[in-house]
Image: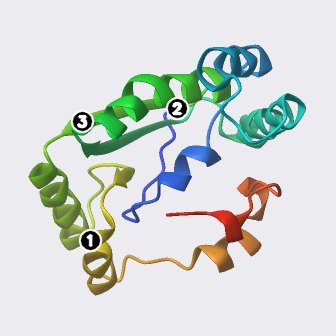
Amino acid sequence: MKRSIKSTTALALALGFLGAPAWAGMEEATAFLDSEIGEMSTLSRADQEAEMQWFVDAAAPFAGMEIHVVSETITTHEYESQVLAPAFSAITGIKVIHDLIGEGDVVEKLQTQMQSGENIYDAYINDSDLIGTHWRYQQVSNLTDWMAGEGADVTNNGLDVADFVG
C-alpha cells in the first residue's frame, strides 16, 4: 500500500517528519554526519547523534511512505535534491522524490494545486515572496499551534524555534 501526504502548505519542515523501513537508521545517520556535517555543526557529535536518533524513532510509524517535493533550480535546492533528500531517505526510510524545475513552473504548479485542491506535489520549497499567495488561498497553518498539538509527536523537542531563521 502506498501512503502519501496530501498538503498544499509549502512546508520544508515536513521533510523532517517522515518515514522508516528496517534498512534505515543510525548507521546511515552516522555515515551522513561523517560525510556531510563533520565539524560544521554547533552541536556536539553526541548531540548530533541524539538528534538523528530522534529522526529515526519519529519516522518509524511512517515506514514506506513516499513524498514528492519540488523546488526551483538553484544551487541550494540542487544540494537539497541531490544530497539531503537521498540522505533523508536512507536515514528514515521515506522515499523522497525531489524534482527541480524552473521558478515559474514551481509557482504555476503551486497555484494550480491551491486553486484546484488537487495534489500535484506533497511539498513545495518556495520563496517567501509567495507568503501572500498562500494567505489569499487560505493555505497558511499556524505551526506553533500544530507543533504543540496534533504535530507534537513529530516535532523535535530539541528544535530551538526562537533560534530558527526562515
Left or right of 93, for residue 100: left
Q: Residues within 10 Å of mark 1 (few under 14, many from 20)?
A: some
Residue 107 visible somewhere in the drawing: yes
34 or 150, which is in the foreground?
A: 34
Q: Report the mark closest to the observer, 2 or 3.
A: 3
Contact check, label 3 and label 1, Cβ < 8 Å: no
Q: Position of residue 119 (x, y in %)?
A: 30, 55
Quickly name the residue at label 1: 130
Q: Residue at (29%, 35%) from the top-left corner?
A: 75
Residue 150 visible somewhere in the drawing: no
69 or 35, which is in the foreground?
A: 35
Quickly name the residue at label 2: 1
Q: Residue at (75%, 18%) from the top-left corner?
A: 30
Q: Residues within 10 Å of mark 2 (few under 14, many from 20)?
A: few
Quickly name the residue at label 3: 100
Q: CA distance from mark 2 to mark 3?
A: 27 Å
Amino acid at the residue labelled 1: Leu
Q: Residue at (26%, 71%) from the top-left corner?
A: 129
Residue situated furthest right in the rendering? 46
142 or 164, which is in the foreground?
A: 164
Quadrant location of residue 114?
Answer: bottom left
